[in-house]
Amino acid sequence: MSASKTHFRTCNLCEAMCGIAIKVDDGVITSIKGDEDDSFSRGHICPKAIALKDLYEDPDRIRRPLHKVDGEWQELSWDDALDKVAARIASLQAEHGNDAFGVYLGNPNVHNTGSILMSGGLLRTLKTKNKFSATSVDQLPHHIVCWKLFGHQLRIPVPDIDNTDHFLMFGANPLASNGSIMSVADVKQRLKDVRKRGKLVVVDPRRTATAELADAHHFVRPGSDVLVLLAMLNVLFSDDLVNTGSLTEHLDQDPAHLAASFAEFSPEKVAPLTGMSAEVIRTMVHDFCAASQPVMYGRLGVSVQEFGTLTQYLIMLFNILTGRLDSVGGLMFTKPAVDILAQSGRGHMGRYHSRVRGLPEFNGELPVATLAEEITTPGAGQIKGMMLIAGNPVLSTPNGEQLDRAFEKLDLLVAVDFYINESSRHADFILPPVSPLEREHYDVTFNVLAVRNNARYAEALFPRPKDGRHDWEILLGLRDRLQPAHSLKEKLARNTIRRMGPSGLLNVLLRKGPYGGGKNPFAGLSLNKLKKSPHGVDLGALKPASGAISHHADRKVHLEPAFFLKDLARVNTRFFNRDTGGDKLLLIGRRDVRSNNSWLHNSHRLVKGKDRCTVLINPEDARHLNIQDGQQLRVSSRVGSIELAAAISDEMMLGVVSIPHGWGHHRSGTRWLEAEAHAGVSVNDLTDEMHLDELSGNAVLNGVPVTLQAI
Ligand SMILES: Nc1nc2c(c(=O)[nH]1)N[C@H]1C(S)=C(S)[C@@H](COP(=O)(O)OP(=O)(O)OC[C@H]3O[C@@H](n4cnc5c(=O)[nH]c(N)nc54)[C@H](O)[C@@H]3O)O[C@H]1N2
Ligand SMILES: Nc1nc2c(c(=O)[nH]1)N[C@H]1C(S)=C(S)[C@@H](COP(=O)(O)OP(=O)(O)OC[C@H]3O[C@@H](n4cnc5c(=O)[nH]c(N)nc54)[C@H](O)[C@@H]3O)O[C@H]1N2
Ligand code: SF4
Ligand SMILES: [Mo]
């Protein structure tokens, strides 16, 4: 007799949170489809969801703890592995101090319920200042802007895509990425609907799939968005278009006095440096203001550039000055069922600085661009050991080659990861968690950024194997060994949390949250209610928060011009008082719908076909440099060079080339056979760890000066 069942859950691979229906026959996954009845995603799915099956079945996936002895991997029992790792961390910290042990948290942590809810204990126990994460190669500017303006680093508004009639988008390609800091499934249809109501306008140095779909696309010179925005604010003031509407009473100051800051940035002055005409810049402002529910949004392309934080600030300011913050169709705040803002710190900056370069921490993390030098520079506080939790910084952070060499020098490297990737290959110990289908899932993080309030929970599809461990069990296992409970009371408390697990905690948070029943155990949202709603519970469209936008004590939105606009001095030096790079081409990144940062390349169905790790170049640049389509090129920057094939395309702006990140699987000692067959090269062997958005310490991954040479 064959057993067949369909399991409903949320795909945790990217921010879109698609509902999926997984059919299992006799314990084998036979199909993964979009769940048509899903309350959030309405049946949408992308090719990556099927990779959840590949990931579960992958023979290269590590399933038991590994210890490297004389260059050979040996399997260990969990108790033995956790004992050994904890002992090594403890002795390293005893000898060299707490800061000698560093931690890097990769992107998948925020897609993992247990890690989000239960990993704090270990991080606190380690008491290290050397904490890094993928945040500083990504959304750090968003946190800083929202911390300053709204008093909480996670109080991040998202575009109300379902109601806007004019979507002005800088540096995002949701048709490939499926949306970011805007969790939205089926983004293509939603953007088509925007066009039916009005207009989609895209500003990007590449004519991406999203730009193709748009009503208008404008090329912009990489890294010069800051000038475009300064000029747009200039026009807003000079053409008398500032109108803060009902937001006025919630602002801490009259924005009229900001006009002076933008006075010198006329469209005519900045246009030649941006690749956009003054007329286009003016039209963008007037079209925006003529729409009834416009929104401006900027994402990764403008976050990881030289003026990332100032640019994100100016985007927020533009929305505020046009009355589009907290307004239907504009930038709106969500009301998630689990209120993680209440559970997490509001943010702080500059409480301490990195040892070598003196870069400020933000919210307890240092910029990852400084990690390699913290490992290689001798002296008190030098990093001697590291733990990588769900990350691959050798491929994902600037000057990865240098970090690769630095990792080799560590006395101890521990990786919590189920692959031996380009970073974990240097590890002494690998502690592999189970795969996503072997654990429960509730999206704690991305519901905070979702374009519709929603709650969905799924139990594990496959039981956790006896010799498997969840991420949270691994992290708590280390915590308990490094810092045993010091009293009976503490012991009982720890046991209770362990027994509750992520789902128990989730239930408490759901009940305490804005849709929970409070003291009434039968009312409101609870884990039980979600278990009975396999397609999720729709909690409605985003609504204006009106008086309750800000977490500042005075409940006002703080405009903070001094903090952000001090960076105008750097803008002036960079663009108006310095030779701007001569004949160098500017390098930007790109994403593909069948890829996910550095790590889904071991799924054959996602990597097969035409080589995607190519350098895209404009036909005129190619002609000028005598480059043929498909020809091997050497691309060089200050930090290194890589070799890959040219792909000539007029989708590129003149003077700009594009290379995707996450490739470069040729390094020896990894264990992902399929990925090695489609190795590619790593663009982060070109990006420069010394080139930062100075206001935040965020890495500059777009607008890197490079030269091309045919080989
Ligand atoms: N040049 C350039 N560089 C970039 C970017 C770019 O656009 N251009 N993008 C940047 C961005 S936005 C990001 S977020 C970073 C990402 O950078 P990272 O977070 O450093 O890298 P990932 O490729 O996401 O690595 C994920 C690792 O986590 C493991 N993993 C997956 N799921 C789990 C899990 O549940 N538990 C555990 N323990 N491990 C798991 C995978 O096996 C993989 O090894 O890259 C950044 N780097
Ligand atoms: N398929 C897939 N989906 C993903 C990921 C993935 O790797 N693959 N990664 C996930 C992660 S971690 C993240 S953070 C999100 C990111 O999601 P998005 O923010 O949508 O990021 P990208 O798709 O990289 O799009 C960035 C765009 O910025 C443009 N750009 C580059 N430089 C500049 C510039 O100077 N100015 C302007 N205006 N534009 C510029 C690029 O050409 C590109 O089209 O995607 C997530 N989703
Ligand atoms: S878009 Fe993202 S969440 Fe949706 S199926 Fe693809 S990877 Fe999963
Ligand atoms: Mo990211």
Image (cartoon, grey):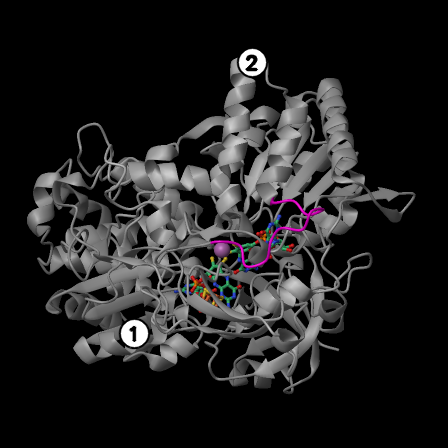
Q: Amino acid at mark 2?
A: Leu
Q: Of marks 2 and 1, which one's residue comes earlier in the chain?
A: 1
Quadrant of picture, ligand 1 = bottom right
Nearer the camera: disc 2 or disc 1: 2
Residue 128 as seen in the image, left or right of residue 323: right
Residue 271 x %, y %: 32, 67
Kindly identify which residue carries mark 1. Answer: 191
Residue at (36% x, 72% y) in the render: 186
Q: Which residues are magenta?
A: 459-470
Whether residue 151 is visible: yes
Residue 328 as seen in the image, left or right of residue 638: left
Which numbered circle lies on residue 488?
A: 2
Q: What secondary structure is marked by label 2?
A: helix
Q: 10 Å neighbourhood of mark 2: few (<14), some, or many (≥20)? A: few
Between 586 and 361, the residue placed more toward the observer is 361
Q: 10 Å neighbourhood of mark 1: few (<14), some, or many (≥20)? A: many
Residue at (53% x, 42% y) in the render: 115
Whether residue 697 is visible: no
Residue 94 x %, y %: 72, 18
Residue 296 x %, y %: 26, 61
Between 45 and 253, the residue placed more toward the observer is 45
Is label 1's Cβ within 8 Å of ligand 2?
A: no
Residue 251 as seen in the image, left or right of residue 122: left
Which numbered circle lies on residue 532?
A: none
Q: Is residue 205 above or below residue 537?
A: below
Q: What secondary structure is marked by label 1?
A: helix
Query: Main structural element of the magenta stretch: helix, strand or loop?
Result: loop
Q: Is residue 559 above or below residue 226?
A: above
Whether residue 707 is in magenta: the answer is: no
